[in-house]
Image: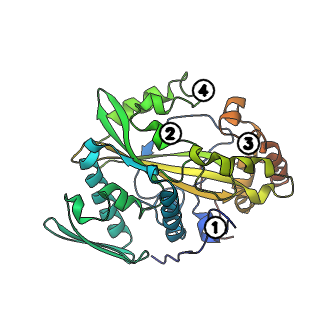
């Protein structure tokens, strides 16, 4: 696999993050139809999908090194972005094993894992890490096993404990979230941490999702997409840092809207863990500016239609009220009103 990393790009300050043509064509665009409404929209997490972002268990792309660096910066400023309750230690090791095995299998040129009984050696070539350790002995790692491996993966992760016919968020590494807080939600049950979402509760989305996930089987992971919009390519839009990123929404003008407003897509994956029976929830974040997305004709038309017809409750909940009309106006010239095929594939091979 010919991965070429962009190690110096930034998600703060000068915001040098950009997508290459290849990265844009593999972007997991979230809208299969011209209208959007909350849905369970869970499907098996099998290899392959509308773009290359679905080809591996955990997607690694050109932003890998820069995202790991950004995570380290966030943790340096706020160590509480990674917390795991003590009873989840088995789930921590389950997570480490799953991520190491998956990365070593899917990206052998970048990662390798050697095992002799409980003595394991992990090599992460992009980050220059070689670590020998004893599986099950946290003292042989520089930090807890969950923190250790999720510092080396793109996207956020939470681990859920299953008990009393419910799922409880009892651990997480959360540094790239869309305005929610691990520190607030830690220990909450499934409906509690989804409490702020409008419209979805009355139509039973979360009731159906919980019933489905309680029956999630080991070896049969599932996935879904979620989305919102973010000003600037900023990964850390946490409540803890709202004073930093919140005012960005007031800076949007018709002249800068295409470059500053980014579609923020979460490729969410869920895995049953083998020893703990917990559930690992991966939340991989992808960012693309409106101008970048408009280079794909299908995406420009569909994004225009989805934003134009969004229900008011979703506009408000996702924080789009102030700048949404400017995005719609900018995209309107790209939309000729012609019918679009369903699905999220870009339907072009080159830009």
Q: From the viewer's perspective, tell me whether residue 220 is left or right of residue 29.
A: left
| Callout 4 crowding tier (Cα within 10 Å): few <14, some 14–19, many ≥20 | some
Q: Secondary structure at mark 2?
A: loop
x and y, in percent, of residue 164 in the image: 29, 26
**Which residue was labeled with disc 4?**
199
Q: Of circles 2 and 1, which is in front? A: 1
| Residue nearest the viewer, comparing 207 with 96 | 96
**Which residue was labeled with disc 2?**
41
**Which residue was labeled with disc 3?**
307
Measure the alpha-carbon separation of dots 1 and 4.
Answer: 33 Å
| Callout 2 crowding tier (Cα within 10 Å): few <14, some 14–19, many ≥20 | few
Q: Mark 2 touching mark 1, by CB under 8 A?
A: no
Q: Secondary structure at mark 4?
A: loop
x and y, in percent, of residue 113 in the image: 27, 71
Measure the alpha-carbon separation of dots 1 and 3.
Answer: 22 Å
Mark with earlier residue (2, 4) = 2
Mark with earlier residue (3, 4) = 4
**Which residue was labeled with disc 1?**
19
Identify which residue is drawn at 70% across, 57% down. 232
x and y, in percent, of residue 218 in the image: 27, 46
């Amino acid at each position: 696999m010919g991965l070429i990393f962009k190690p110096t790009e930034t998600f703060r300050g000068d915001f040098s993050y950009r997508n290459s043509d290849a990265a844009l064509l593999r972007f997991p665009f979230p809208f299969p139809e011209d209208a959007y409404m909350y849905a369970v929209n869970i499907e098996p997490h099998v290899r392959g999908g509308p773009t290359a972002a679905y080809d591996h268990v955990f997607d690694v792309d050109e932003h890998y090194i820069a995202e790991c660096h950004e995570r380290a910066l966030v943790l340096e400023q706020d160590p509480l972005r990674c917390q795991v309750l003590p009873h989840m230690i088995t789930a921590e090791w389950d997570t480490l094993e799953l991520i190491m095995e998956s990365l070593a299998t899917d990206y052998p040129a970048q990662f390798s894992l050697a095992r002799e009984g409980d003595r394991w050696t992990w090599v992460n070539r992009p980050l220059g890490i070689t670590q020998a350790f004893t599986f099950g002995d946290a003292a042989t790692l520089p930090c807890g096993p969950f923190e250790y491996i999720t510092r080396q993966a793109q996207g956020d992760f939470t681990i859920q404990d299953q008990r009393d016919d419910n799922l409880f968020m009892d651990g997480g590494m959360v540094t790239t979230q869309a305005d929610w807080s691990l520190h607030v939600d830690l220990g909450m049950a499934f409906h509690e941490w989804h409490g702020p979402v409008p419209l979805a509760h009355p139509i039973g989305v979360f009731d159906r999702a919980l019933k489905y996930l309680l029956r999630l089987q080991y070896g049969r992971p599932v996935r879904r997409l979620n989305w919102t919009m973010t000003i600037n390519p900023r990964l850390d839009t946490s409540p803890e840092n709202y004073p930093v990123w919140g005012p960005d929404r007031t800076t949007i003008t018709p002249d800068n809207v295409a470059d500053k407003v980014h579609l923020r897509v979460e490729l969410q994956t869920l895995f049953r863990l083998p020893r703990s029976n917990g559930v690992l929830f991966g939340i991989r974040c992808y960012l693309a500016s409106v101008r970048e997305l408009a280079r794909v004709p299908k995406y420009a038309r569909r994004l225009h239609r989805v934003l134009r017809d969004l229900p008011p409750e979703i506009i408000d909940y996702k924080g789009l009220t102030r700048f949404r009309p400017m995005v719609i106006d900018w995209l309107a010239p790209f939309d000729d009103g012609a019918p679009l095929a369903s699905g999220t594939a870009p339907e072009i091979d080159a830009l």
